[in-house]
């Protein structure tokens, strides 16, 4: 059957192809981005979009979709455009007040879970929780663990609180303040942090990709290690002996983080790598 050229532009396949081409200059994941954006508008999964490729989209929905693609071209993350991001199979609300959870941060969750018993009470601390991604992932896997999460941003904690309530994870305690300040005098068996670790130069180079996320959650000083140094220095007085500290860091920072851990009295240092083989999380056990 002959299809009118103008009408064919409203076909799902055509919309996806055209907008992928338009977005390629601005995003290395253009196809994935447009599928997520159109799926958000049409309330369809990516699999459902592919199956419905020959279906037509209403002009109103197409207009909403192309508007989102234009916003993505300015660097706004997809998660902010759709208002959510999946992390550890949890659907998390995200806003401009929080860092968008990255896939590599799931490595930090995996690392934490290896040190938290499944069926026994434990105390876990997540520093700089943002949207609550790490804390809520751990809470979902360890119902007997008392999870505490801190963040210096009231706005970020409000998002984390919303996510905790939406997921019905009631054993998560959220506290406002800088790093360990809200948990003064308390000790934990496992502490993790995904602190700001982008160096000043890296932030300038990648400003287009990072400009719509909170700078406070990204910039880690001249070498990217300012917050990491502070956390490692203060962690021993908040850990039980033989407790674990795990930190996410930049892919070039692994050796420096391992040295800092050893100098602070941590042994058994071990680095976990991402799919590209770069060390992204380094842990250590407090040995005195």
Image (cartoon, helix red, strand yellow):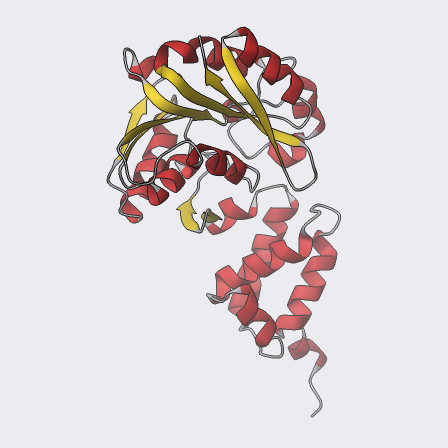
Above or below, 106 relative to 255:
below
Above or below, 93 relative to 10:
above
Residue 101, can we see it? no
Quarter assignment of residue 18? bottom right
Q: Residue at x 45, y 48 (%)?
A: 83
Say whether residue 118 is left or right of residue 110: left
- Looking at the image, which is closer to me, 79 or 149? 149
Say whether residue 30 is left or right of residue 230: right
Q: Position of residue 118 (x, y in %)?
A: 33, 40
Quadrant, the N terminus: bottom right
- Looking at the image, which is closer to me, 202 or 187? 187
Say whether residue 22 is left or right of residue 138: right
Q: Position of residue 58 (x, y in %)?
A: 53, 73
Q: Residue at x 42, y 31 (%)?
A: 115
Quarter assignment of residue 282? top right
Quadrant, the C terminus: top left
Q: Residue at x 64, y 22 (%)?
A: 254
Q: Position of residue 31 (x, y in %)?
A: 67, 57
Q: Residue at x 39, y 36 (%)?
A: 132
Above or below, 272 relative to 74:
above
């Amino acid at each position: 059957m002959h299809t009118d050229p103008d009408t064919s532009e409203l076909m799902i396949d055509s919309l996806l192809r055209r907008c992928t081409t338009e977005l390629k200059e601005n995003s290395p994941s253009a196809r994935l981005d447009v599928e997520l954006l159109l799926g958000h508008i049409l309330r369809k999964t990516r699999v459902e979009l592919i199956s419905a490729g020959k279906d037509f989209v209403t002009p109103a929905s197409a207009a909403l979709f192309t508007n989102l693609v234009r916003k993505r071209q300015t660097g706004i993350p997809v998660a902010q455009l759709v208002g959510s991001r999946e992390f550890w199979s949890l659907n998390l609300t995200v806003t401009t007040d929080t860092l968008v959870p990255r896939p590599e941060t799931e490595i930090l969750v995996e690392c934490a879970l290896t040190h938290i018993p499944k069926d026994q009470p434990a105390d876990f601390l997540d520093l700089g929780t943002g949207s609550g991604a790490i804390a809520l992932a751990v809470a979902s896997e360890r119902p007997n663990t008392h999870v505490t999460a801190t963040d210096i941003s009231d706005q970020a904690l409000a998002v984390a609180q919303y996510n905790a309530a939406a997921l019905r994870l009631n054993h998560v305690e959220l506290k406002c303040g800088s790093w360990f300040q809200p948990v003064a005098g308390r000790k934990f068996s496992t502490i993790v942090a995904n602190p700001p670790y982008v160096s000043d130069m890296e932030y300038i180079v990648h400003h287009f990709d990072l400009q719509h996320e909170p700078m406070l959650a990204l910039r880690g000083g001249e070498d990217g290690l300012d917050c990491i140094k502070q956390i490692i220095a203060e962690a021993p007085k908040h850990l039980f002996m033989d407790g674990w500290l795990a930190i996410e860091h930049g892919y070039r920072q692994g050796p420096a983080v391992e040295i800092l851990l050893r100098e602070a009295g941590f042994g058994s240092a071990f680095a976990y790598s991402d799919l590209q083989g770069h060390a992204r999380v380094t842990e250590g056990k407090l040995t005195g």
